[in-house]
Image (cartoon, rainbow, N blue to C red):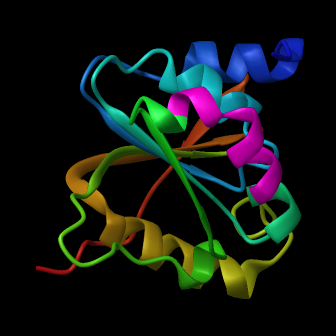
Amino acid sequence: MSTLSPRLAAIVDALPLGSGLRVLEIGGGPGAAARAAAGRIGDGHLLMIDRSAKSVALARRNAADEIAAGRMSVRQVAVEDFALLAGEAPFDLAFAVRVGALDGRHPKAGEAALLRIARALTSEGRLFVDGGDPLRELGLPPRPL
């Protein structure tokens, strides 16, 4: 079990996590932050998504215990293509660290990503990204009715 870097630890510490929350991590890479966050949501659930098959495979291996316990799942999908599965409950909170579609590096993908995230969150859902101290909250477009 690897430990979090000081930067990732500060990000996870800054998230408003609580028991029972449904959390979406976007671009989770090998799953280090996802595993740490999953350990702070009690009987909640964390879904980590990443566009990279290699990252998803690493996260599944690294988070085998969390996945087996039902606290975490991993899905390969780009955020700009993400959608809830049929019958899947929306998420209370989403976060992303170094995701180009959300940090301004890829504005066109960012527009699509924000719409997809808004549709996947509850009406009170919040999105946090790195780049603040250590996080900043991004506003979301209006959620469709």
Q: Quadrant of the C terminus?
A: bottom left
Residue bounds of the magenta highlight: 57-66
The picture quadrant where one finds residue 36 is top right
Is 86 situated above or below 44? below
> Which of 122 and 35 lies nearest the eye of the viewer?
35
Question: From the viewer's perspective, is 19 left or right of 117?
Answer: left
Is 129 situated above or below 52? above
Question: From the viewer's perspective, is 101 left or right of 69?
Answer: right
Residue 57 location in percent, x, y?
Answer: 78, 56
Residue 26 magenta-highlighted:
no
Residue 60 magenta-highlighted:
yes
Residue 11 location in percent, x, y?
Answer: 69, 23
Q: Main secondary structure of the magenta part?
A: helix
Is 132 situated above or below 23? above
Residue placed farthest to the left in the image?
145
Residue 5 location in percent, x, y?
Answer: 89, 17
Question: From the viewer's perspective, is 123 left or right of 102?
Answer: left
Q: Quadrant of the N terminus?
A: top right
> Which of 125 and 66 lies nearest the eye of the viewer?
66
Residue at the spot 82% in from the left edge and 69% down from the top edge: 52
Residue at the spot 79% in from the left edge and 66% down from the top edge: 104
| Residue 20 shows in this picture | yes
Question: From the viewer's perspective, is 41 left or right of 98?
Answer: left
| Residue 97 shows in this picture | no
The picture quadrant where one finds residue 112 is bottom right
The picture quadrant where one finds residue 81 is bottom right
Residue at the spot 83% in from the left edge and 56% down from the top edge: 55
Residue 43 location in percent, x, y?
Answer: 27, 23
> Which of 114 and 93 lies nearest the eye of the viewer?
93
Residue at the spot 73% in from the left edge and 39% down from the top edge: 31
